Structures are given as structure tokens and as C-alpha cells.
Image (tube, grey):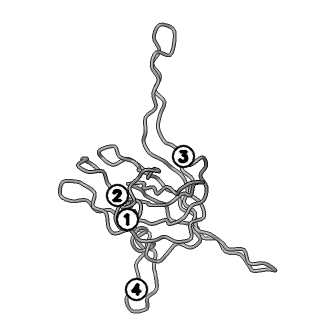
Amino acid sequence: MANKVKFGLKNVHYSTITFDEDGEPVYATPKPLPGAVSLTLDVQGEEVEFEADDVIYYSSYSNTGYKGNLEIANITDDFRKDVLGDVEDEASHVLMEYASAEAKPFALLYEINGDQKATRRVLYYCTVSRPGENASTTGKTKTPQTDTMSLTAVPLAGGLTRARTQENTTAAVFNGWYQSVWRPAAAPGV
């Protein structure tokens, strides 16, 4: 049965991207990014309207990806090193942020629950901002603070932006979702 509703966010993973000599993306093995709190994505693109015969004769929207926020309970040191460009001092094991560091692109994999079955999703080319930092004193109750990053997801050169499983997705694909970044067979630029 198809899902009637969706809720929840879990199993967030990331996969760093490099590019081969032909400019094709090469994805690293996905790593977990535990503690997903929320993911908000707003569509990006422009509406195109063409007027003729005194009416809107043609209307269309371009798809240039998504922008939003990814909120995590506590960003992992691996993510800080792999994506944000932080550097670990080998002798002291102190993690350092340099002003010259540039965030690296990555694929974002995640799962959203449904009333029938979860769907697993991937955004193929993401970048994030550095997270701010929140801290507050502990009073009578302990309120966890979270890390939030601005996230941008754009299409790959071939136009592929994201993918998601369906109710009839094979068990092999669904169960192997976090072993490697799923890509369609024989599609350039993906």
C-alpha cells in the first residue's frame, strides 16, 4: 500500500564527492550523521510566463534545486573534517577550523517514515554553511542544544537532483541504500 502521510526523519548519512577526469561524480562510502532533528527544503527556480492572445499562453517553472536547513543534535567530528574542512592536529588531536577552509560537496542520504513504509532519499550534490554555536546554562532541566547548517542542493551536470524509494522499490535497493549512493544505470552526469 502507498503511504498516506509522512513523518519523522532518521538515518541521515553523507557521502563526499570527488570528480573523475571526465567530470563525473565519484561518491565515497556513506557515513552516518546521527541525531537528525529536522530537514527543511524550499524549492529553488523561476517561473517563466509567456503571454500571447491576451492570456498567459505558456507557463513553466525551472528546477534549480533546493535551499533550506539541516538541524543535527551534534555534528560529528568526521563530518567537520570530511565536509567542513576542519583539521585535526595529529599530536594533540585538537580539531581546528581555519578561515581559509572551504566546505566540500556531498550527497545527503536520509529516511522519512510513512504510515505504511519508510522512504529513503538522496540529494546528489549538496553544500552547507558552517554551523553557528549555541550553548546555555543548565537550570532545573537540561535542554539539548543543536547545530544547524544552511543547506543547498543543486542538480548535477546531467540534471539529476534527487531520488527516493517507492513502495515497489526492490528490497536489495532499499536495504543497500546506505552502502553506496544509488545512481540510475547508464545516465550521464549522475
Q: Residue 160's x, y, as percent?
A: 35, 46
Q: Residue 7's x, y, as percent?
A: 61, 55
Callout 4 environment at 10 Å: few (<14), some (14 to 19), or many (20+)?
few
Q: Are marks 2 and 4 in contact (CB under 8 Å)?
A: no
The residue at which mark 2 appears reads as 182
Q: Is residue 154 left or right of residue 190?
A: right
The residue at which mark 3 appears reads as 42
The residue at which mark 4 appears reads as 89
The residue at which mark 1 appears reads as 176
Q: Tag 3: residue type?
A: Asp
Q: Is residue 72 left or right of residue 174?
A: right
Callout 2 environment at 10 Å: few (<14), some (14 to 19), or many (20+)?
some
Q: Are marks 4 and 3 in contact (CB under 8 Å)?
A: no
Which residue shows up at 36% across the image and 65% down it? 16
Total labels: the figure holds: 4
Closer to us: mark 2 or mark 3?
Answer: 2
Callout 3 environment at 10 Å: few (<14), some (14 to 19), or many (20+)?
few
Q: Earlier in the sequence, mark 1 or mark 4?
A: 4
Q: Earlier in the sequence, mark 4 or mark 3?
A: 3
Q: Earlier in the sequence, mark 2 or mark 3?
A: 3
Tell me the element at label 4: loop
Q: Tag 1: residue type?
A: Gly
Closer to us: mark 1 or mark 4?
Answer: 1
Closer to us: mark 2 or mark 4?
Answer: 2
Which residue shows up at 41% across the image and 82% down it? 88
